[in-house]
Amino acid sequence: MNADWAALTRQIKEASDIVAVVGSYLTLHPAGQTFKAVCPFHNDHKPSLDVDPRRQRYRCWACGKVGDAISFVQEYEKVDFVQARAILASRAGIAIEAGGGVSDRRHELIRAMKWADGQYQNCLTESSAGERARIYLGERKLTGPTVRKFGLGFAPGDGQFLCRLGQSQQISPDTLAEVGLIGERQNGEGWYDRFRDRVMFPIHDVRGQTVGFGGRILPNSPSADRSAKYYNSSETPIFSKSDLLFGLDFARSAAATAGCLAIVEGYTDVMMSHQHGIENVVATMGTALNHRHLQQITRYAPRVVLVFDADEGGTTGVDRALELFIRHDVHLTIAALPDSLDPCDWLSASGPEGFRKALDTAVDALEYKLNRLIEKESSGGVTGTIRIVDGILKIMAASPPSAGQAAKIREQLLVTRICQRMGLSESAVRDRLEELRRAGMLKDREEAAIERERDRQREREAGQGAGQSRSILPGPGTPEGDANRKTAGPAPMLERQLLEIILAEPALVAEAAREVTPEQMTHPGLRKLLECLYMLKGRNEPPELDALRVHIPHPALIARAMEMQEIGRTTGDRAKWLRTVLDGFHRRKVDEDKKQLRERLHFAGDDAQALDLLRQIQKRSGVADAVGQPPPPTSAAS
């Protein structure tokens, strides 16, 4: 790293407006001079994330996450500082130097997945071992172009296909194991393929990189009766099924054009939809939709169509999804399929017209819910009416206060619909909705208070465990090498002020280094920051905060450094302030020396030793009195 690297980092940050970056992941709502969003870093019920374009910072007032555009990409994409820097550089059209992108290990894992993807594809299309899989895909009426577009492959059933190829091509078994493709035998004698006798569906991130696989056991496999029909990659450093949607890399452009994204339940449903020209379709991977899925979806389309079977299971899925979508102010509609058909079978049998019409005429999710409740409770009299109304209003009450105008119009229309269908006055329905909203807000505040108290208790427990790993800041996590130090409490004001000044004005690091050593810092987190700043200065590299982020892979500590830098920037004459702080360090050092001398005086063996110690104490008292005094006047030149 050098001055050019630091300058390029500044250029990337200047080209990455915090509102544009966060807004590309989340739905932002104006709130005065800032913007609000539902925080993606905890289970946020109300918009707790504040995005400030003036300071180019974000902060969640609930979970405490804070940072700049690079920090946000780090946290959201689960990458390190260098990777986040590369992502933003690519977004801004800024070329970066070799080594400024994906870390070597992550790049190696991505390469291994790409290699495995090619082996599986070759086995399906070129090998006699893939004949049964080709027949199965033909029976599902998936065409050759569709199979090639989605990169399908086949894993033979002998359990050694990938192990054998990896060994012959010098692919490390440890790497293949780390990405979940092979496993080590229990006796430690060799490896085995995790995917066996399965059609392989590669799972891509939004950039089109293969990061995982879903495997479908062949129906005529000898192990079909004792194996799961579908088997997904395990969680790895590059794959989390709760973060990904199958087919999103192909669907995102079509979703942006259509203004909606359809979500189905299976890989073949997605593929058959694309095969019939309906390309704004994706699928989850055996997991319920969550807020991370939703944040990806809303980057590409304002409306979502959930495609479910018209049975009890489908209704349950709608109920689970409704509150999530309402809380995130995303328009959700429902397309129910006829006769318990899945999209793949329906499209294969009837072509695209029926499915396309179902998507185009999808019903608003709350209205769908209202219709189902009325069907269920219509004979329940007054009690049934109350259950219907409360069943809808409790969901509506979860919508954020900053919901957009379109959501407010939908709310008004639905309130009107409830009044008409249930024979109630609008004022009665509105009063009940506001009552439920107030109850929900109170519950949210109580839950937030409980969670904060749990966090504080965890911090106290972490600090009390003798010999246990301890946090260098109020929060989880410990940098490597700090494991056995004394638990850190609040940082002393003097030490905080030193870091505030030099983080705000790196040119003052050299002066600080001449007078204060890292060993004088009692707080281990601040000591680590100071050590790294001095190290950078010693290497003739800019001792700047962004340079620290490469050497300190500890988000909480970096976030604290950003806050200290902001405080430091509010002070005008930082050089004068630094002089005062350095004098404070001198006084503290003198006080510590005097304390040690007094302790030695208490145990002095004779009068001569005691007298010598008294003289040393007196001498240090004189030094302490002199610290901070102006220099004596000099005589004018003759």
Image (cartoon, rainbow, N blue to C red):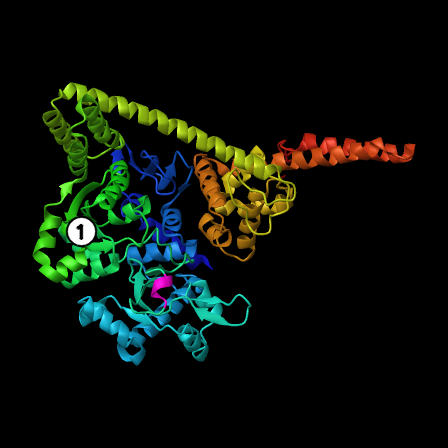
Image height check: is 400 above or below 350?
above
Image height check: is 565 above or below 602?
below
Count of picture labels: 1
Residue 473 on the magenta segment:
no
What is the x, y in percent for residue 214?
33, 62
Q: Is residue 303 left or right of residue 184?
A: left
Residue at numbered disc 1: 340
Q: Amino acid at mark 1?
A: Ser
Q: Main secondary structure of the magenta part?
A: helix
The image quadrant where one finds the C terminus is: top right
Magenta residues, as a range?
223-227
What is the x, y in percent for residue 61?
39, 34
- Res 407 quadrant in image: top left
Residue 226 on the magenta segment:
yes
Structural crowding at the residue carrying mark 1, measured as other residues with C-alpha within 10 Å and reported as few (<14), some (14–19) or many (≥20): few
Q: Residue at x 55, y 68 (%)?
A: 188
Return the residue nearer the eye: 378 or 213.
Answer: 378
Q: Is residue 250 left or right of residue 183?
A: left
- Res 614 quadrant in image: top right
What is the x, y in percent for residue 332?
20, 42
Return the residue nearer the eye: 70 or 489.
Answer: 489
Which structural element holds mark 1?
helix
Return the residue nearer the eye: 541 or 398.
Answer: 398
Image height check: is 551 above or below 461?
below
